[in-house]
Image (spheres, rainbow, N blue to C red):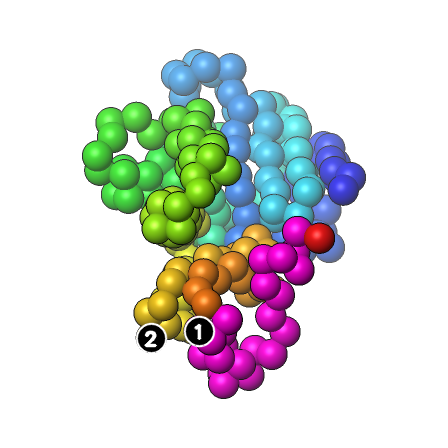
Amino acid sequence: MSNNIQLHKNDLPDDLDLGNLIAVDGEFMGLNVRRDPLCLIQLSSGNSDAHIIQFDRENYNAPNLMKLLVDDKITKIFHYGRADMAHIKYYLKTDTNNIFDTKIASKLARSYSDSHSLKTLIKEFININHSLLKTNNIKEFEKYLSRHEFLISNLIGLKPVKEKLFKDYEKGIVKSLGAWGGDFVLVTGTKADMQYFTKKGYKIIFNYPQLIK
């Protein structure tokens, strides 16, 4: 999969549509808003794209970007976005509406920890993945999958697929896959347990031996 990285001078193009969920990150010369200018803003829709807006620091004229930032219908994802939003407010003279901050989400979901950097979050996911690969116990496997699902759900603000579609499935776990787009899921249970899903109209089911051939 190739990455689509585009540099835009001063503002976004008029016809650019990034959808209703975008990641936002700012780059500035330091943390003192009045002294350290905003240099650029990076945006991504999550589809292997990055749109970098490099500002003319004489006037910061970016009407298309400002329109996107204030749009309540578009969720802007930051990680510890306090400094980003302060610089945006000071230099672009605009608010940023409909914000989802993954560091705040981490504090809510991971109250057992006082470390909420991206590095720490990624490390926790990696540790879960390593545990999944090592275990040969189905109960431990389900525990790690459930933990992974819980963390992702709280960080991205989406309900797990089991909570949305399969609340009454009690024989095992249902893990969201396909980038949480609903394309397919991972389920634990016996062959007989899979009748629950066929009765709901989900007839394409692969068992474990079929997947590892």
Q: CA distance from mark 1 to mark 2?
A: 12 Å
Check the image and report above or below for 212 versus 120: below
The residue beneath circle 1 is: 193
Residue 5 visible within the image: yes
Residue at position x 61%, y 43% in the image: 44
Residue closest to the far left: 112
Left or right for 16, reference 190: right
Which is nearer the eye, 136 or 24?
A: 136
Q: Nearer the viewer, mark 1 or mark 2?
A: 1
Under mark 1, the amino acid is Asp
Check the image and report above or below for 79 versus 74: above
Q: Residues within 10 Å of mark 1 (few under 14, many from 20)?
A: some
Which is nearer the eye, 52 or 65?
A: 52
Q: Residue 25 in the image: state x and y as whole percent.
A: 52, 33
Residue at position x 50%, y 38% in the image: 133
Magenta residue span = 191-212
Check the image and report above or below for 188 versus 145: below
SS class, disc 2? loop
- Earlier residue among tags 1 and 2: 2
Q: Residue 3 in the image: state x and y as whole percent.
A: 74, 38
Residue closest to the far right: 2
The residue beneath circle 2 is: 168
